[in-house]
Image (cartoon, helix red, strand yellow):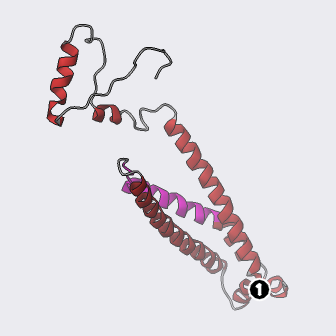
Amino acid sequence: MVGNPDNASLFYLRSDDIQNQELIRKEILATPGLSEYQVQTLQEWMSLMTPEHLPGFNAALRSVIGIAVIVGFIVVFQTMYTAVMERTREIGILKSLGASRAYITNVVLREAALISIAGILLGIALTYLLKFGLSYRFPTLPFPLSLDWRVRAALIAFSGAILGALYPALKAARKDPIDALAYE
């Protein structure tokens, strides 16, 4: 495994009973010449395969999440900006009927929030569908989905949607009703 031909770097032993693992470990370490070797159970070895023990994994994960948030923000911003521009006439009608800037902003932000919530629910449902498919394909691998990550993902998506819709909402609220009604 480490590039030394004719040398072994790792041995796997299968015990007849999981209760005997500690006895096997003690016997290996008591054997002359093997006392300096590291002996671990599979559970101990697998516990080292966590993001905290893999160098750079958390930094890479945070970078990917940051890029996804920025791309999501830009997509929501562009979508809401386009929606506001296409609804210029409707916004002009609302303003001519006496709708305040706060009301117009509220309408646009509520729409963004509703779309965001629908996207979050769809994303969670697709995540569980993907987990089911992966668990079926790879039955020995665990695919944990913690509540903490679901909440974080939902908060990131929701805050990105609201921040992405904020400027288009304020732009819609500042529209002049006369110009908006004349817009084609």
Dot 1 crowding, Cα within 10 Å, few <14, some 14–19, many 20+: some
Residue linked to disc 1: 89
**Image check: 168 left or right of 161?**
right
Q: Where residue 137 appears, x then y in whole percent?
A: 42, 54
Residue 109 figure quarter = bottom right
The count of marks equals 1
Seen at 76% across and 76% down, the residue is: 85
Q: Where residue 74 appears, x then y in whole percent?
A: 68, 59
**Image check: 180 left or right of 160?**
right
Choose between 102 and 180: the one closer to the eye.
180
Instruction: Work out whether 75 lies above or below 88.
Output: above
Assess whether residue 83 is covered by the magenta stretch: no
Under mark 1, the amino acid is Arg
Assess whether residue 155 is covered by the magenta stretch: yes
Residue range highlighted in magenta: 142-164
Choose between 86 and 107: the one closer to the eye.
86
